[in-house]
Image (cartoon, grey):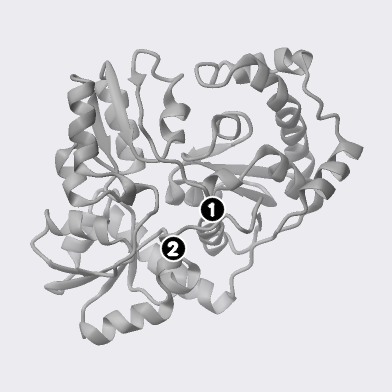
């Protein structure tokens, strides 16, 4: 666990991190990308950190990968590449950088290390885990294989390196249906998200069996929540992530992956929209789509919110919290991720 008082003392000795309206004005172009959701006083607090981080990135030849669930000051202020967990990991393969800082949760940093074993991957907070990734182990995969002999294991990328290594192929929420349908076996094992698996099963001709894991953000939504909200806010487009329970997905106007949600809102530009996913998604696209009124409620991921500007600055300054993956595990995990990438390309996804 990070010693925050020590962290702040050390950083204050090297950087002027006091709130500053002058630095805020200096970075006005950056602020313009988030001004609908970040107040000017808050920006005066964030701006000195943003300035210090962006300067340090150049010194360290580093890039920051920002997940869509990061808060706006991280997503817009310091991230070099943004997207869902796989998009940003794949982008890391293309960058000419020595150091990658993962602004996301731990399994994402592992995925980046799996795909970029030669790069230094830093995690701002090692305690930023994931309820879904932690719901299954490699032993759980073997348990499912014993229960369904011969069935291929399709594993969500939101998993640890050990679990990826024990699987046949990975999937994302955007390609899960196509990957499952492309399997030769009539029965397909999906891990670890039971709701993504059930939503895929509702659209697939395969017998989809699954591990009973779930995401603490998406499992909290109920179909009744959506029905009540629709009554209170008629005309609002309800847009759900497929990690939500099937009855929630059925109640929504649209369901799709993180990238699919972004595309839907960008293309459709509804007057009002409620994103039935993690809170920061709406905040991060609000300034891109000023014509859309993003309304609540939403659920916040406590793990994602462990990542902050000061923790990002700290790992860039010290080089601490490097993420390692056993080379043999990494090789097997990379094979399951690569199998997904190759199949997605063959399917034209």
Q: Quadrant of residue 139?
A: bottom left
Which numbered circle lies on residue 312?
A: none
At horizontal 63% and vertical 33% (from top left) the residue drawn is 78
At horizontal 21% and vertical 78% (from top left) the residue drawn is 151
Comparing 274 with 53, the one in front is 274
Q: Quadrant of residue 186?
A: bottom left
Pick out the residue farthest to the left: 205
Disc 1 on helix, strand or loop? Answer: loop
Comparing 35 with 264, the one in front is 35
What distance separates the C-alpha of mark 1 from that of mark 2? 10 Å
Q: Which residue is mark 1?
A: 105
Other residues around mark 1 within 10 Å, as few (<14) / some (14–19) / many (≥20):
many
Pick out the residue farthest to the right: 13
Rendered view: 180 above or below 34:
below
Which numbered circle lies on residue 133?
A: 2
Residue 163: x %, y % from top left: 43, 72
In this picture, residue 282 sits left or right of residue 221: right
Other residues around mark 2 within 10 Å, as few (<14) / some (14–19) / many (≥20):
many
Comparing 333 with 66, the one in front is 66
Let me know if residue 253 appears in the view. no
At horizontal 18% and vertical 50% (from top left) the residue drawn is 246
Disc 2 on helix, strand or loop? Answer: helix
The number of numbered badges drawn on the structure is: 2
Name which of mark 1 and mark 2 comes first in the sequence: 1
Residue 292: x %, y % from top left: 33, 17
Residue 327: x %, y % from top left: 58, 75
* Quadrant including the N terminus: bottom right
Residue 69: x %, y % from top left: 47, 40
């Amino acid at each position: 666990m990070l010693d925050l008082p020590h962290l702040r003392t050390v950083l204050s000795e090297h950087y002027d991190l006091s709130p500053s309206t002058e630095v805020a004005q200096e970075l006005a172009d950056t602020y313009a990308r988030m001004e609908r959701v970040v107040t000017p006083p808050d920006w005066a607090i964030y701006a000195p950190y943003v300035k210090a981080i962006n300067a340090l990135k150049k010194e360290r030849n580093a890039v920051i990968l920002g997940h869509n669930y990061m808060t706006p000051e991280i997503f817009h202020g310091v991230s070099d590449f943004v997207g869902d967990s796989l998009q940003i990991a794949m982008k890391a393969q293309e960058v000419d950088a020595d150091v990658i800082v993962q602004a996301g949760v731990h399994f994402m940093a592992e995925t980046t290390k799996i795909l970029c074993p030669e790069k230094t991957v830093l995690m701002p907070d090692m305690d930023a885990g994931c309820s879904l990734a932690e719901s299954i182990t490699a032993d759980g995969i073997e348990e499912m294989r014993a229960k369904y002999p011969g069935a291929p294991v399709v594993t969500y990328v939101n998993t640890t390196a050990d679990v990826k290594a024990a699987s046949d192929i990975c999937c994302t929420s955007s390609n899960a249906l196509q990957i499952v349908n492309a399997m030769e076996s009539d029965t397909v094992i999906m891990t670890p998200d039971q709701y993504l698996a059930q939503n895929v099963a509702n659209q697939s001709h395969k017998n989809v069996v699954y591990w009973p894991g779930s995401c603490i953000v998406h499992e909290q939504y109920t179909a009744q929540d959506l029905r009540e909200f629709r009554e209170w806010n008629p005309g609002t487009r309800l847009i759900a992530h497929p990690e939500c329970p099937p009855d929630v997905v059925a109640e929504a106007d649209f369901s799709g992956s993180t990238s699919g949600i972004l595309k839907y809102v960008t293309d459709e530009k509804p007057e009002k929209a409620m994103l039935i996913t993690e809170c920061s998604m709406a905040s991060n696209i609000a300034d891109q789509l000023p014509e859309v009124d993003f309304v609540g409620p939403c659920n916040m991921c406590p793990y994602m919110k462990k990542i902050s500007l000061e923790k990002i600055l700290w790992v860039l300054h010290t080089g601490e919290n490097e993420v390692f993956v056993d080379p043999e595990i990494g090789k097997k995990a990379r094979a399951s991720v690569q199998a997904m990438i190759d199949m997605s390309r063959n399917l034209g996804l």
